[in-house]
Structures are given as C-alpha cells and as structure tokens.
Amino acid sequence: MIVDAHLDIGWNALADGRGFLGPPAPRYVISRDSLIGAGVGLVFATLYTAPALARRAMRTRYVYENAHEAHIMARSQVSYYRACEVQLIRDSRDLERYVGGWRRGQVAAVMLMEGADPIETPSQLGAWTDMGLRIIGPAWSRTRYSGGTRAPGGLTKLGVQLLKAMRRKHVILDLSHMADQAVADAFEMWRGPIIASHSNARELVSGDRQITSATAAEIARRGGIVGISFYPNHLRSKGKTSLEDVVRHAVHHARSTGGPEHVGLGTDLDGGIDSRYGPIADLNELKQLRGMLRKHFSAAQVDGVMGENWIAFLRRSLPAPTATRPTSSR
C-alpha cells in the first residue's frame, strides 16, 4: 500500500471544480480512480483554506477574510468528503481494521488541517476532532496561531493554547509551513506526535518553505516522519522536475534523520500542480519510484518510504478508540 500524506482533495474540488470522483482534470493527476490504479490506499486529506493574501498568488477568489469564514470553508470540505463517502481513519482500531483488510480498490483518509484559522478558538477543537480531524498544521502563511511560509514569527499566545488543546485531544502536530521561530517554539513545548507532512530539504532548495536538516533530525528523534513534496518549486529551484529530484530529497532526508525509516511521501500533487511542470504526468508513474529508491535503500526500506513508515507512525500516534464517538465514520 502506498501512503500519500498530503492531498488537497476538498480544496481543489470546491475552489477549482476538480472533483475527486471523476477522472483527473486536464493536466492534473489526482482522482479516486487514479489513486486506486497507482496502488495508493491511504491519504492524508486536507482541510485547506486560503487567506485573503493568497488571492493574487494563487489566482483564486475562494479566500477568507476572517476566522469565521475560514471555519465555514473548512466545514464545507468536511461535507465534501462525506458526500464522496471517503472512509475516515479516526483511531488505532480503524487503522488496524483497514490495513489488515486492505485490497486494491480501497482508499481511506486521515483528515489533516493545513493552516489552523478555521478553528475559531482552541476551545472549539473538540468539535473538529469529533468530525474526524486528527492532524493540524498551525500555519500556511501567517495565521492567528503561528508564523508561516514567507511570514516569519513564532507561535502566538493563541497558538500556544491550541497546541495544549491538541495534546489533550491526542492530535498530531504538522510542522510543514511553520516559520523557523514557530518550529523552535513548538519543539520547546510539544511532547506529542510530530511530522512534517510535505517538506523538502532546505539544503537542496533554499527558502523557508523547506525544512533544515536539524529540523528533520529533531522530528526523527521524536519518532516522527518527514514527507517529500512533489511540488516543483520544492524539488528544485529551477528547471523541469523529475522523480530523480524526489529521490534526491529522500536520500538527503534519510541522511539527516539517521535512516529512511523517518521518510515518507507527502506529494501535494493535488495542490495546484500542473503536470506539465511536476515530476510525473500520470499517477501510475509512482510505480517507477520504487525501483529508483531501491538503488539507495533495501527493499524493506523502500516499502517504508512508499507507505509503511506512515502506517507505523499512525499505529503509535492515533488515539485509542473511545467508548462513545459519532455514529458515522464517514
């Protein structure tokens, strides 16, 4: 089973009309059927909302001006996943049942929030976890909680409160997009499970969107995983990207973290990547990656990077099942 730790499925359906249940939109590669065909059985499906400052950069009018608008936008994506009958993995029992019985033709999801502004106050977090939210990245650009990409700054007072609430609710912390000072603040106070769902190596591609080797090493020391993004600007600073660039970042991360056991995929392939510029034009090309990684890692280690590392992380990080929870797992 291949695991992809970052896909903006709901955002792309509602903001750009690239629906999950139909074929991939022209020049894009993600749909339910394309995931199944490539052998992807588990994804981290995001709740991403674009702040007003993204209007020009992302060429979208689907933006929020305040926390309540962000809340409504994220709730609409939850509703979209339900309408698509996406099976949500909520706890360790769900995971074991799904992985143990998985066969090709099945795709399930763990819900991840990218940019925490939809959580209007930290006291609202319980409502989100009841909906199935299991991972939160506090930042995209700057949010009310954290400095972010091209927006330096640490955790705000509200951000500190959010992380405390996340720990109480057994929510996983995602460092991707967080500014360097916010990452340092998180390392100082956070004692729960931690990842960077889609972050490449800053030593290979400069810029604060990538993570340093020191950050990757600390994530690994805490038992976390770093996911490799397929976004062109994350793979190389200029020129056409290829799967060789993905391998280059995988090898670098493996060296930084002490081994490929802390490396996975977080492709962001549905995050607006036109396949003319990305490393693959068809999701089936993921099958080629396995052989390319085999030149650097053992067969078991390659299985880890392709998916087993994420599954092992979720086994030790998802909450245990509770006696009572919402009746629907969809």
Image (spheres, grey):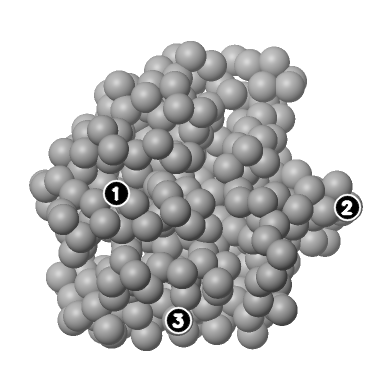
Nearest the viewer among 29 and 320 is 320
Give me the C-alpha separation between circle 1 and circle 3: 22 Å
Q: Residues within 10 Å of mark 2 (few under 14, many from 20)?
A: few
Q: Residue at x 22, y 34 (%)?
A: 184
Q: Is residue 273 above or below residue 53?
A: above
Q: Which residue is situated farthest in the left direction here?
A: 152
- Residue nearer the viewer, 196 or 243: 196
Residue at screen point 22% across, 72% down: 51
Q: Is residue 305 visible?
A: yes
- On the image, the x and y values in percent for residue 166 come to 41, 55
Q: Is residue 202 above or below residue 94?
A: above
Tell me the tag on residue 75: 3
Q: Does dot 3 land on a helix, a strand or a loop?
A: helix
Q: Badge 3 local density, few (<14 within 10 Å), some, or many (20+)?
A: some
Earlier along the polypeptide chain: callout 1 or callout 3? 3
Residues packed near mark 1 inside 10 Å, few (<14), some (14 to 19) or many (20 plus): many
State the SS at label 1: loop
Q: Residue 296, located in which quarter of the rendered image?
A: top right
User: Dot 1 corresponds to which residue?
Assistant: 177
Q: Residue at x 53, y 16 (%)?
A: 259
N-term mark: 1 or 2: 2
Residue nearer the viewer, 70 or 243: 70
In the displayed structure, would residue 194 be above or below residue 138?
above
Which label is found at residue 101?
A: 2
In which quarter of the view is residue 50 placed?
Answer: bottom left
The percent coordinates of residue 190 (x first, y second) are 34, 39
Q: Nearer the viewer, mark 1 or mark 3?
A: 3
Q: Position of residue 104 (x, y in %)?
A: 84, 55
**Could one spot residue 26 in this view of the protein?**
no
SS of the residue at dot 2?
A: helix
Q: Which mark is residue 326?
A: none
Residue 254 location (% of width, % of height): 49, 20
